[in-house]
Image (cartoon, rainbow, N blue to C red):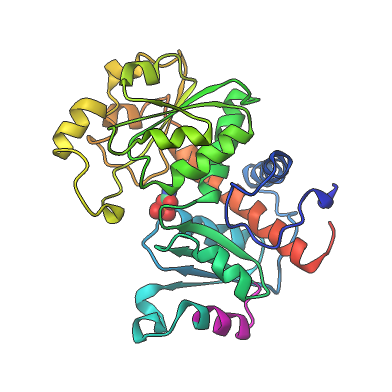
Amino acid sequence: MNLNRWKRKDLFGIEVLERDELEFIFEIASDFRAKMDAKDKSLPSLEGQSVVNLFMEPSTRTRVAFEMAATRLQADVITISQGASSLVKGETLRDTAMNIQALGADIIVIRHSSAGSAKYLSKIVDIPVINAGDGAHEHPTQALLDCFTLKKHLGDLNGKKVTILGDILFSRVARSNIWALRKLGADVTIAGPATLVPKSFETMGVTVCHKLEEALYGADAVILLRIQHERQTSTHFPSLGEYTSMFGLNEKRASYLKKGALIMHPGPLNRGVEIDSSLADSGRSVILEQVTNGIAVRMAALYLCSIANKNSTF
Ligand code: CP
């Protein structure tokens, strides 16, 4: 395998990646996913390396998937939450990262409420930094696992219609997915309340559509997003009930999608708000498959950033 296809120490966003780098991550992740399914332990090893997960915002899927990914690669894993760190005593993020490096960490995975925090840390420490979500900016490994899942079902994404529905404005998942899907040639439509789906997103090469039926019509997949209350400072629609009645995905609205279209959600999902439970649990939903694929994709991210930093080979 030609490892020259990946030269980056860090993974702080999709925006800066080339299409070939995305494809290379998918190839490695596909290999890891196949070995996971076959319970094949002959994986490349990060034995002796320490992965420190700095999670400064709540997380279930991303945190556990990074922990599982590092464990499967035989690395040691330490997870630190904001409340259990000296950040609450006034230590800066910079000093926290410098101290973690001094303690011997080999890779830092960070989730933080500030946009740009992962890139900022990558300039401060010498070890790889992987972004697990920075404010409303990017969530690169989520987009990678979403596209990996889409490709598994749809093959080449060139010309495929993918609709992202919900709170686009405050969503790092939406931004990273738009970058990734556009680089892979998909036609991306974004939809939701006009207050949360501004026209300015057209500069990212997407179609902005406020007519839900039009946005869903003929789509190969729909990615639903929850309302990101934690990042909103004012009200962007009258009530959750009104949001659901206008934009919630139900059976009738799902009938506008292409036959066999995939229903996706990064989680956590709010059942009965952005998606009916019957759809979330239906055969068209790949929501839990996304979660499982997240382990393989994060194994690939940890592995590639690690070898690029150590300049080693398979
Ligand atoms: N999709 C996602 O980031 O979920 P968590 O917040 O649970 O990690």
Q: Is residue 100 magenta?
A: yes
Instruction: Note whether 217 is above or below 19 in the view shown.
Output: above
Q: Toward the viewer: 252 or 202?
A: 202
Q: Give residue 155's position: percent from left, percent from top.
A: 64, 25
Please state the total of marks drawn on the protein image: 0
Q: Is residue 156 left or right of residue 121?
A: right
Q: Residue at x 75, y 54 (%)?
A: 42
**Quadrant of residue 147 in the image?**
top right
**Quadrant of residue 71 in the image?**
bottom right
Q: Give residue 265's position: percent from left, percent from top.
A: 40, 38
Q: Residue at x 26, y 28 (%)?
A: 247
Q: Toward the viewer: 43 or 120?
A: 120
What range is drawn magenta here? Answer: 96-106
Q: Residue at x 45, y 13 (%)?
A: 259
Instruction: Note whether 173 is above or below 214 in the view shown.
Output: below
Q: Give residue 158's position: percent from left, percent from top.
A: 63, 23
Q: Is residue 281 left or right of residue 229?
A: right
Q: Toward the viewer: 36 or 214?
A: 214
Q: Give residue 66's position: percent from left, percent from top.
A: 54, 59
Q: Is residue 165 magenta?
A: no
Q: Residue at x 70, y 74 (%)?
A: 48
Q: Is residue 187 left or right of residue 45?
A: left
What is the magenta segment's predominant secondary structure? helix
